[in-house]
Image (cartoon, coloured by chain):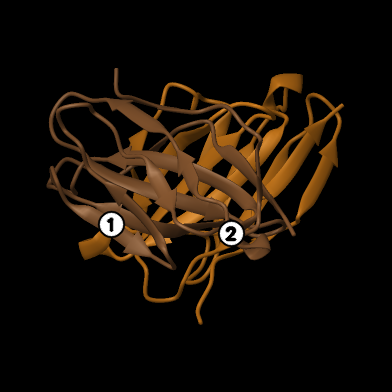
Amino acid sequence: EPEVTQTPSHQVTQMGQEVILRCVPISNHLYFYWYRQILGQKVEFLVSFYNNEISEKSEIFDDQFSVERPDGSNFTLKIRSTKLEDSAMYFCASSEVGARDEQFFGPGTRLTVL
Amino acid sequence: GDSVTQMEGPVTLSEEAFLTINCTYTATGYPSLFWYVQYPGEGLQLLLKATKADDKGSNKGFEATYRKETTSFHLEKGSVQVSDSAVYFCALSFLPGSSNTGKLIFGQGTTLQVKP
């Protein structure tokens, strides 16, 4: 069964450093998402991406964040200068264009900012 | 704004017990409602969904009914198993349209522990 994969599973970084979280969506999906979950809090929407551009973003997704589909398989989330409060579990998801309410999630990357 | 509220966890049950996890929502308009499950070390998986009032979603013995009058979507299972131990997330989304990306709005998750 096809699945969404994410790497790394755990990333530790120093405050102010740049990190790139990677995701490989399901191959025939064209809608991509990033969500995050700060420990003990809700899973929050960050951004959706379609046709090589952001289709929607939340207030959390400020200028420190960017997304990219650098090739035909990867979808990345970059945080330019990490802050302590960026520590969270980051989930990637993908969906078919005609079934955007059925999203398939990856296992998540735990980001720890020291 | 739109939001989802779930009962606090963890919920600890013995095998074969009846499960209810409460979920209520606040939304402008008519959302679709979902339950996602996250098993240890895995991503969130769609468990069931309902797209309109009085619809019942069901899967793997779990059920939830979209109650517009009480803005609720409670998850139930008649007889839980140890393998049901996981974190359960209630969520809402608006049906994709030309200006709607289908982003999910989640509750905080409820941890279920089932003991043999």
Left or right placement of residue B31 versus residue A5 in this view: left
Q: Colour of chain A?
A: orange
Query: Do tags 2 and 1 sit on the same chain?
Result: yes
Q: Position of residue A87 (x, y in %)?
A: 73, 30
Left or right of B36 in this view: A100: left
| Quadrant housing the C terminus of chain A | top right
Report which residue position mark 2 lands on. Answer: B16
Point out residue B25 in the picture as x, y percentages from the top left corner: 31, 27
- CA distance separating discs 2 and 1: 21 Å
Q: Is residue B23 above or below residue A32?
A: above
Residue type at mark 1? Gly
The mark lying in front, picked from 2 and 1, is 2
* Count of numbered badges drawn on the protein: 2
Which colour denotes chain B?
brown
- Residue B85 visible in rendering: yes
Residue A18, picture quadrant: top right
For the view shown, which residue lies furthest in the top direction? B1
The local secondary structure at tag 1 comes to strand
